[in-house]
Image (tube, helix red, strand yellow):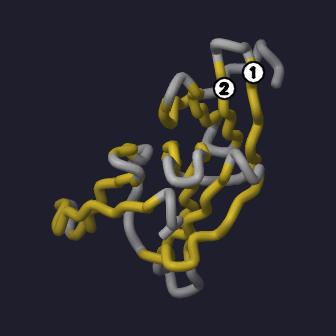
């Protein structure tokens, strides 16, 4: 990346000194500042991320959420999970739901959580909390 360019950088999360950073919602990095190590784990288009630690498998994981627009103008999200141990992405098959994810997921007790609402007629209705368990990736 050219240092002279201005790219918005977002901190996705931090666990045990490891920091996850997203640049322009397409490049994701895992950074360990104590040893000055940076890992680029993906290039793609995700509208939201979450970063957490899977205690059961001793693994750091990132959940990426992509919003799709269907031919009938309906929208749905697809989730993927990245495993640092496996250095690979896996699709969350049961995650095709039509919801909004305006912020990064919050990591609590082994799960990544997002708030969700449906916006109808300019008002937010029906607040929910959606979560992904990092151990079973569901």
Q: Which mark is residue 54?
A: none
Tell me whether the residue at label 2 lies in contact with that at label 1, contact meaning CB atoms closer than 8 angstroms.
yes
In this rendering, position of residue 102 left or right of residue 90: left
| Distance (Cα) linking label 2 and label 1 | 6 Å
Identified at 64% across, 69% down, the residue is 91
* Residue 111, image quadrant: bottom left
Whole-percent x, y for residue 138 in the image: 48, 70
Q: Label 1: few (<14), some or many (≥20) within 10 Å?
A: few
The residue lying toward the viewer, choosing from 13 and 86, is 86
Q: Is 30 in front, or is 78?
A: 30
Query: Which image quadrant for residue 97?
Result: bottom left
Q: Residue furthest bottom?
A: 72
Which residue is depicted at the point 57% across and 71% down?
92
The residue identified by callout 1 is 37
Residue 23 percent across, percent down from the top left:
64, 34
Q: Nearer the viewer, residue 44 or 15?
A: 15
Q: Write the residue at 35% across / 54% down.
A: 114
Crowd tier of the residue under label 2, counting other residues whose Cα lies within 10 Å: few below 14, some 14–19, many 20 or above = some
Secondary structure of the residue carrying numbered label 1: strand
Which of the two discs, 2 and 1, labels the residue nearer the N terminus?
2
Q: Secondary structure at mark 2?
A: strand
Q: Quadrant of residue 117?
A: bottom left
Depth order, front residue of 30/77: 30
Rendering coords of residue 126 (x, y %): 17, 68
Query: In the image, residue 26 lies at what x, y percent?
Result: 68, 45
Q: Quadrant of the N terminus?
A: top right
In this figure, which residue is indicated by the disc labeled 2? 31
Residue that protrudes farthest toward the right in the picture: 2
Query: Residue at position x 48%, y 34% from top?
Result: 13
């Amino acid at each position: 990346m050219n240092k002279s360019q201005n790219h918005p950088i977002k901190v996705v999360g931090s666990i045990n000194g490891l920091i996850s950073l997203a640049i322009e919602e397409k490049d994701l990095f895992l950074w360990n500042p104590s040893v000055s190590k940076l890992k680029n784990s993906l290039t793609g288009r995700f509208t939201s991320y979450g970063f957490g630690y899977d205690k059961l498998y001793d693994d750091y994981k990132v959940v990426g959420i992509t919003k799709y627009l269907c031919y009938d103008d309906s929208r749905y999200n697809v989730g993927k999970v990245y495993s640092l141990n496996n250095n690979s992405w896996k699709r969350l098959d049961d995650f095709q739901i039509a919801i909004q994810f305006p912020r990064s997921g919050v990591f609590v007790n082994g799960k990544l959580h997002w708030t969700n609402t449906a916006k109808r007629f300019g008002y937010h209705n029906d607040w929910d909390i959606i979560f992904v368990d990092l151990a079973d990736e569901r």
